[in-house]
């Protein structure tokens, strides 16, 4: 009998994708025995202001960062939808051929109860959280109450002080960013002169 594959989903603005995103996807694969992880760039992350780079650039940088590791796959499904990007719409559109795990950092776990129809999300996925510096990987009380057993798992992950915000700020200020980015992504950023405007960092 065919076994239903376990697939991870890592959504993000990826503005730009950085080393902690890739480390997180790999750590989730290893720790949770996932067949692969799909990285989903958001078209219009509604809780954010203006993004620093257009969708086509964020997608291309993600493809560069994932190339060479067959366990990491870029899924552009959210870029094909108009309007605000709601994760619930993405989950409803994915084929029901796999068991899905939504991977997220502890900052977004703390924010989870502000997501559109967050209760309904729990019908589609279990959550897997990795700690980010400064935010413990524990669910807010409202989420803890709504979770079923096994609905939230922890990914063993040494907290990494890397964020896209810091990278955008460093790029705009001309500071070095090479320890936080895949060199192919950094080359792409330089070639397309991205993130030079301090207003969008
Ligand atoms: N250093 C990190 N450790 C663990 N999880 C992370 C880390 N950076 C990002 N993530 C997680 O990856 C997902 C996508 O993150 P996102 O694309 O917003 O990057 P970001 O670095 O948080 O960006 P920004 O600084 O612009 O908010 C989110 O679930 C986020 O919590
Ligand atoms: O569905 C929502 O309402 C929702 C609200 C906030 C964030 N998300 C998703 O969480 C992921 C991380 O978001 P961000 O803003 O940290 O890049 C990304 O896939 C977003 O689409 C989703």
Image (cartoon, helix red, strand yellow):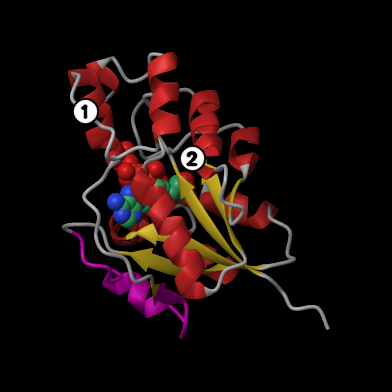
Q: Residue 65 carries which label?
A: 2
> Is residue 53 visible to us here?
no
Image x and y of residue 134, in percent: 16, 58
For label 1, the crowd category at 10 Å Cα-Cα, with few meaning under 14, some 14 to 19 and many 20 or more, is few
Report the side of 123 relative to 119 (left or right): right
Tell me if residue 144 is in the magenta stretch: yes
**Real-space CA distance between mark 2 and mark 1, rounded to the nearest whole angstrom:** 19 Å
Q: Find numbered disc 1 in the image and state the secondary structure of the residue it sits on.
A: loop
Tell me if residue 54 is in the magenta stretch: no
Q: Find numbered disc 2 in the image and state the secondary structure of the residue it sits on.
A: helix
For label 2, the crowd category at 10 Å Cα-Cα, with few meaning under 14, some 14 to 19 and many 20 or more, is many
Report the side of 162 relative to 126 (left or right): left
Image x and y of residue 89, in percent: 60, 50
Earlier in the chain: of badge 2 and badge 1, it is 2
Image x and y of residue 79, in percent: 60, 34
Magenta region, residue range: 135-153
Residue at position x 54%, y 30% in the image: 60
Based on the displayed image, in which of its 4 quarters is residue 146 positioned? Answer: bottom left
Residue that carries the numbered disc 1 in the rendered image: 176
Image x and y of residue 182, in percent: 40, 38
**Which quarter of the image is occupied by the C terminus?**
top left
Q: In terms of depth relative to the viewer, which is nearer, 82 or 94?
A: 94
Q: In terms of depth relative to the viewer, which is nearer, 29 or 99?
A: 29
The answer to whether mark 2 is within 8 Å of ligand 1 is no
Q: In terms of depth relative to the viewer, which is nearer, 42 or 15?
A: 15
The vertical placement of 175 against 108, above or below, is: above
């Amino acid at each position: 009998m065919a076994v239903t594959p376990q697939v991870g989903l890592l959504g993000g603005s990826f503005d730009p994708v950085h080393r902690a995103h890739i480390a997180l996807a790999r750590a989730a694969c290893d720790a949770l025995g996932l067949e692969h992880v799909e990285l989903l760039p958001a078209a219009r992350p509604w809780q954010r202001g203006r993004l620093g780079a257009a969708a086509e650039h964020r997608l291309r940088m993600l493809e560069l960062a994932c190339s060479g590791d067959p366990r990491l796959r870029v899924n552009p499904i959210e870029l094909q939808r108009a309007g605000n990007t709601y994760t619930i719409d993405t989950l409803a559109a994915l084929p029901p051929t796999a068991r899905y795990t939504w991977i997220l950092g502890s900052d977004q776990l703390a924010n989870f109860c502000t997501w559109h129809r967050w209760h309904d999300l729990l019908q589609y996925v279990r959550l897997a959280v990795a700690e980010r510096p400064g935010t413990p990987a524990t669910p807010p009380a409202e989420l803890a109450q709504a979770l079923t057993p096994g609905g939230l798992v922890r990914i063993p992950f040494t907290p990494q002080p890397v964020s896209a915000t810091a990278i955008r700020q460093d790029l705009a200020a001309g500071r070095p960013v090479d320890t936080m980015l895949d060199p192919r992504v950094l080359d792409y950023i330089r070639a397309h002169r991205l993130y030079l405007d301090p207003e969008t960092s």
